[in-house]
Amino acid sequence: MGTPGRSVVVVGAGISGVLTARALALAGWRVTLLEARHVGAGSSSRTAAGIRQQFSTPATVRAMRYAVGFYRDFAAETAGGLLPIAQNGYLFLVHADGLEEARARVVMQRDAGLAEVALLEGDALWSRFPWVGRSIVGGTWCPTDGFLFPERVYMDGAARAVALGAQLVQRAEVVGAAYDGARLRAVQTTAGTFEADLFIDCTNAWTARLGATLGGTPLPVAPTRRYLWFLRRAGQISATDLASWPLVICPDGVYCRPENGESLLVGWAHDAAPEPDFSYESQDQVEAGFSHRGDLDARPFQAWMQLAEHLPAVGDFDGFTATTTGFYAVTPDHNPFLGYDPRVPNLIRLVGFSGHGAMFGPFTALAGLTLAEAGRDVVAVRLPDGGEVPLDAFAIGRTPRHAEALVI
Ligand SMILES: Cc1cc2nc3c(=O)[nH]c(=O)nc-3n(C[C@H](O)[C@H](O)[C@H](O)COP(=O)(O)OP(=O)(O)OC[C@H]3O[C@@H](n4cnc5c(N)ncnc54)[C@H](O)[C@@H]3O)c2cc1C
């Protein structure tokens, strides 16, 4: 079988794939990045792109702390020099019966190194955020959280990978594979055949299909539709105020953040059956009952009413301007799979990001690089600050023990 070499094919050019390709190219790997359509053709261009370090386990807090630092530094590497992150903060609102749990979470997060997270109660909350209604008595607040400009991540990330020597091939859908024994030797695509020593699956919501094409292990990753709606500002909130709002999550799960000074992005998960056979086109299909052009009992209007209950000024906004939709790649515990495929020894899977793949991107890439360099599964990923993130919660074949509790 010989010593594995240092050529790698990464499949999928969303945020996970481009940042993984960049990390590998930086480390001296010969990288080919294959994309079925074009850079950002999947969920990465349909995302709310929130980035938070307020997670429910110390490992994910540390991983997301690394991600925030990465995104803050990333502009310095790119030709345009544009920051891909707006650190407006994240505010999880809680009712009185949620205070105790929120307090415990903040203690855990601070112990994990997130010194700036705090529980604001009563007047401390309302004086800091006067637009929060008085029915809400508390909120966990982290000012270094925020949201990403996703196209800056995947477009600048792809350009950076190419500048570092990676070959980017778009319109190259992986449709077949060739093996040496159990090891993958090459992938066949609609743009030719590509050989490599190592292969990395960054197709996320498509992973069941790519996994089957490559002879990999079936992973429990369910493509599940999610919506975003855009609400035009009006009333007492100025454009400057709105642009400075954090990403706010209400106790019932409805969330919002400024898209810009004139528009509020609103999201709210709903019970949805997985759509394993979704197509590129159906990524943008809006079902009856979810359009902003629908009746007042349509989901966006319910979300607006919920928001207005907790953030009364939003009730005076002008109306919706747009609906967008895309896929979460949902796993049973809402944690991704980051590891070698048990059936194909030179295939790494970095998939199943639920609603977290944009924020996970830098950590995903670091995990991918660590796994590639090791040539086998590893116990933990070492962060540049010397800290470690154990990978047991992300292992393929795990028994879910650390289900992510904060899923929106
Ligand atoms: C409405 C919504 C809100 C969200 N909100 C957030 C949020 O607030 N924060 C957050 O972090 N995340 C959020 N997410 C999730 C996040 O967008 C995704 O987890 C993330 O974009 C996944 O990136 P990716 O690169 O892994 O996958 P994708 O961006 O989907 O990229 C996968 C790529 O693989 C390509 N591909 C597939 N099959 C093949 C093949 N056979 N050959 C070659 N290429 C192939 C596809 O064309 C695609 O470009 C949200 C998602 C949605 C839909």
Image (cartoon, rainbow, N blue to C red):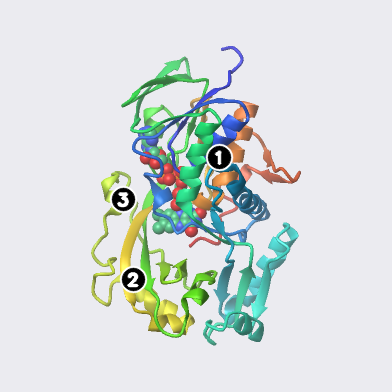
* Marking on residue 300: 2
- Secondary structure at badge 3 equals helix
- On screen, residue 391 above or below 250: above
Q: Nearer the viewer, residue 254 or 6?
A: 6
On the rendered structure, is 39 left or right of 146?
left
Q: Residue furthest top?
A: 2
Q: Label 3 amino acid? A: Gln
What is the CA distance from the residue labelled 1 to the residue labelled 3? Answer: 25 Å
Residue 154: x and y in percent read: 47, 45
Asked if marks 1 and 3 touch (Cβ < 8 Å), the reply is no
Q: Residues within 10 Å of mark 1 (few under 14, many from 20)?
A: many
Judging by the rendered image, the residue that carries numbered circle 1 is 338
The residue located at (59%, 42%) in the rendering is 77
Q: Is residue 81 above or below residue 165?
A: below
Image side of residue 343 versus residue 231, left or right:
right
Expressed as whole percent of the image width and height from the top left, the position of residue 320 reads: 32, 72
